[in-house]
């Protein structure tokens, strides 16, 4: 009987202890949130050239397409395609692809129809420089335009070979859809890849 009574009292004591604990205030602490907000970096580039007037002089007006007629052997045509990396852009490598289809046309005399005076002190060929379609990188270092836009010209003249014949010029004119020089621009972030890898990406982008 005493053992049973003792067991009952202990049981009640345990229940009472738990009930009492539920009324106690716990010690707590809480921090403010640490919020990480991410914005994506930005690269913006532009490619244009200035309009050439009837006298062959460059004007202040920019354009993306020009048509030339009655070009003669030995003629030097003013052109100035230029790439601008816009202000606020992340550091990037800048490329242009110059696709001179005038030099892919088989002309009777066999000479090279045109030459472009690409500024090779600034634009480094990263594909075969003897091909009609060449990819160039702007310098060996990434372009930094975060604090201000950066503009560079690719070439200033298209020079028609002075050894071209009338038959050559007719062959060029007859090649409708092929008598063009097209320039494209491409930029890639400089961080997280080495320059050789980015060179390969640029060539692949242009299909070279």
Image (cartoon, rainbow, N blue to C red):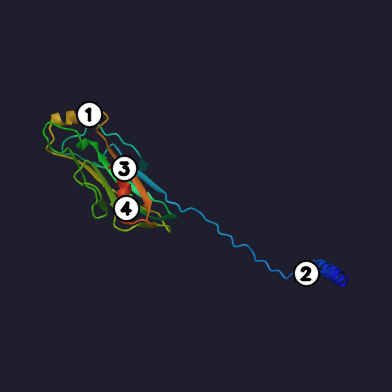
Q: Residue at x 33, y 57 (%)?
A: 194
| On screen, residue 61 above or below 123 | above
> In the rendered structure, are the residues bearing label 3 and label 2 in contact, judged by CB atoms less than 8 Å apart?
no
Q: Which residue is mark 2?
A: 25
Q: Quadrant of residue 24?
A: bottom right
The label nearer to you, 1 versus 3, is 3
Task: Write down the residue under mark 4.
Answer: 197
Residue 203 place in picture, x, y as percent:
29, 46
- Secondary-structure class at tag 1: loop
Total of numbered circles in the picture?
4
Q: Is the Cβ of the residue at disc 4 closer than 8 Å to that at disc 1?
A: no
Secondary structure beneath dot 2 equals: loop
Q: Residue at x 12, y 31 (%)?
A: 108
Q: Quadrant of the N terminus?
A: bottom right
Distance between the Cα atoms at labels 1 and 3?
Answer: 23 Å
Q: Which residue is labeled 1 in the image? A: 175
- Please state if 24 lies on the left or on the right of 105 as rendered: right
Q: CA distance from mark 1 to mark 2?
A: 91 Å
Q: Residue at x 71, y 69 (%)?
A: 28
> What numbered label is drawn on residue 206?
3
- Nearer the viewer's eye, disc 1 or disc 2? 2
* Dot 1 or dot 3, earlier in sequence: 1
């Amino acid at each position: 009987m005493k053992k049973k009574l003792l067991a009952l009292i202990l049981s009640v004591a345990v229940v009472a202890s738990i009930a009492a604990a539920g009324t106690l205030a716990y010690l707590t602490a809480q921090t403010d949130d640490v919020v990480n907000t991410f914005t994506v970096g930005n690269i913006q580039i532009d490619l244009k050239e200035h309009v050439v007037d009837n006298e062959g002089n460059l004007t202040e007006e920019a354009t993306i397409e020009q048509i030339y007629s009655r070009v003669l052997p030995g003629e030097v045509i003013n052109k100035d395609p230029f790439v601008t990396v816009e202000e606020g852009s992340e550091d990037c490598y800048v490329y242009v692809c110059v696709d001179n289809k005038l030099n892919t046309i088989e002309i009777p005399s066999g000479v090279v129809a045109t030459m472009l005076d690409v500024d090779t002190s600034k634009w480094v060929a990263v594909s075969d420089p003897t091909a009609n379609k060449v990819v160039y990188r702007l310098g060996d270092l990434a372009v930094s335009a975060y604090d201000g836009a950066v503009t560079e010209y690719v070439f200033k003249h298209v020079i028609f070979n002075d050894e071209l014949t009338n038959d050559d010029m007719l062959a060029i004119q007859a090649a409708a859809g092929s008598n063009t020089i097209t320039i494209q621009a491409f930029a890639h972030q400089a961080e997280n890849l080495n320059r050789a890898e980015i060179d390969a990406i640029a060539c692949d982008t242009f299909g070279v």
